[in-house]
């Protein structure tokens, strides 16, 4: 059994990736997954991600949503996206009970769990779309590799913040603490598990790439269709990290993520354009790089055209 090193960029990727690993879908292909996360021994910081991939020290990477474009602008073109697990934003904006809608957040402190453009950048774009002016938006972005957002909810209940952008299931935790969810317009986005490898790794390990993509697709199916098996995996692997022990949080997490995960992990063109516009399109040093340049979907397309995904869901 060969071990494949998979690096997650952020705790927000872990619900799906733990299920990918623990569902054992890769075993039939002769592989097992060793899952790492930024902040751990393998990759102490975000800056280690691309370096590890380019050095051949990891097999696959989940994330790296903006750095591929920066690398291409500097002539490093090996970083390649292969698939996208979801195309819709999954973050939730929890707020104090007196906040009725986005307009009530003018000038008020909003805590966000990441400085990344695909997180805080999306939030800012949504608030602008909802009618707030730039000077009325007060987002305090706090990069957190712990995955524990209990303190963010605590900031609201203590009056230190009016709202917080959190991952699920902390939306449910907030509701149970008397907070509310602020409705936001749906937004296509490249977010969470974007599967990446280097072009030289892909070239030299095509059989592994096809197997990994098939396992990835099967893990999506497993997550969406096997809640009784997924919920225990989520709880076992995330309860300590989250500081939440009750089953209802992991039932909520499975149910809501199952709606978001794609049966066929293609990126939406609008999601790619969004993540591009949030960062690359604003930088004159990078905007000559096209939105689709880092993407190579022909491996996924070959699997799809074989009927593999359709048969999986037909069964």
Image: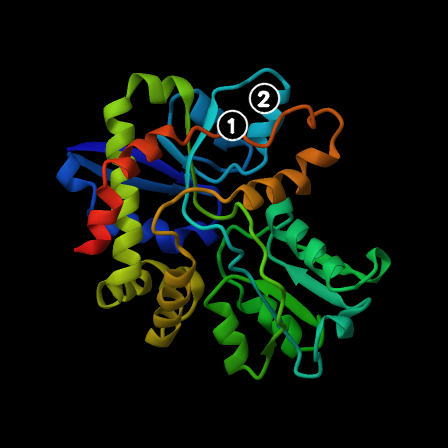
Which residue is identified by label 1? Answer: 294
Count of number-bearing discs: 2
Does residue 25 show up? yes
Find residue 282 and report its horizontal and vertical position in percent.
74, 36
**In the shown orientation, is residue 204 left or right of residue 8?**
left
Q: Which mark is residue 70?
A: none
Check the image and report above or below for 75 versus 288: above
How dense is the environment of label 2, judged by Cα within 10 Å: few (below 14), some, or many (20 and up)? Answer: some
Q: In the rendering, at what x and y percent does residue 157 appear?
A: 64, 78
The mark lying in front, picked from 1 and 2, is 1
The one nearer the camera, 6 or 255, is 255
Q: CA distance from mark 1 to mark 2?
A: 8 Å
Residue at x 62%, y 64% (from the top left corner): 185
Which quadrant holds the N terminus? top left
Q: Quadrant of residue 135?
A: bottom right
Q: Is residue 158 left or right of residue 265?
A: right
Residue 72 got which mark?
A: 2
């Amino acid at each position: 059994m060969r071990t494949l090193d998979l690096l997650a960029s952020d705790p927000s990727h872990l619900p799906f990736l733990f299920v990918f690993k623990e569902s054992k879908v890769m075993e039939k292909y002769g592989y097992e997954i060793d899952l790492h996360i930024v902040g751990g021994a393998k990759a102490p910081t975000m800056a280690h991600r691309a370096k590890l991939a380019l050095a051949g020290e990891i097999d696959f990477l989940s994330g790296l949503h903006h750095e591929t474009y920066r690398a291409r602008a500097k002539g490093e073109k090996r970083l390649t996206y292969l698939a996208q697990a979801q195309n819709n934003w999954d973050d939730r904006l929890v707020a104090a009970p007196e906040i009725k809608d986005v307009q009530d957040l003018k000038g008020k402190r909003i805590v966000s769990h990441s400085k990344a453009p695909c997180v805080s950048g999306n939030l800012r774009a949504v608030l602008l779309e909802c009618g707030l002016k730039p000077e009325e938006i007060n987002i305090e972005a706090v990069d957190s590799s712990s995955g524990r957002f209990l303190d963010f909810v605590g900031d609201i209940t203590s009056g230190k913040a009016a709202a917080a952008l959190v991952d699920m299931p902390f939306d449910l935790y907030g509701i149970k603490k008397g907070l509310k969810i602020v409705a936001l317009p749906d937004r296509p986005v490249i977010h969470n598990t974007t599967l990446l490898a280097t072009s030289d790794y892909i070239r030299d390990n095509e059989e592994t790439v096809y197997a990994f993509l098939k396992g990835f697709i099967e893990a999506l199916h497993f997550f969406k269709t096997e809640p009784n098996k997924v919920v225990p995996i989520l709880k076992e692997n995330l309860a300590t990290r989250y500081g939440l022990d009750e089953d209802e949080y992991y039932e909520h997490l499975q149910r809501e993520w199952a709606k978001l995960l794609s049966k066929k992990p293609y990126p939406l063109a609008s999601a790619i354009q969004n993540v591009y516009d949030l960062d690359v399109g604003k930088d004159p040093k990078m905007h000559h790089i096209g939105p689709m340049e880092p993407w190579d979907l022909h491996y996924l397309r070959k699997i799809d055209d074989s009927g593999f995904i359709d048969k999986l869901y037909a069964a």
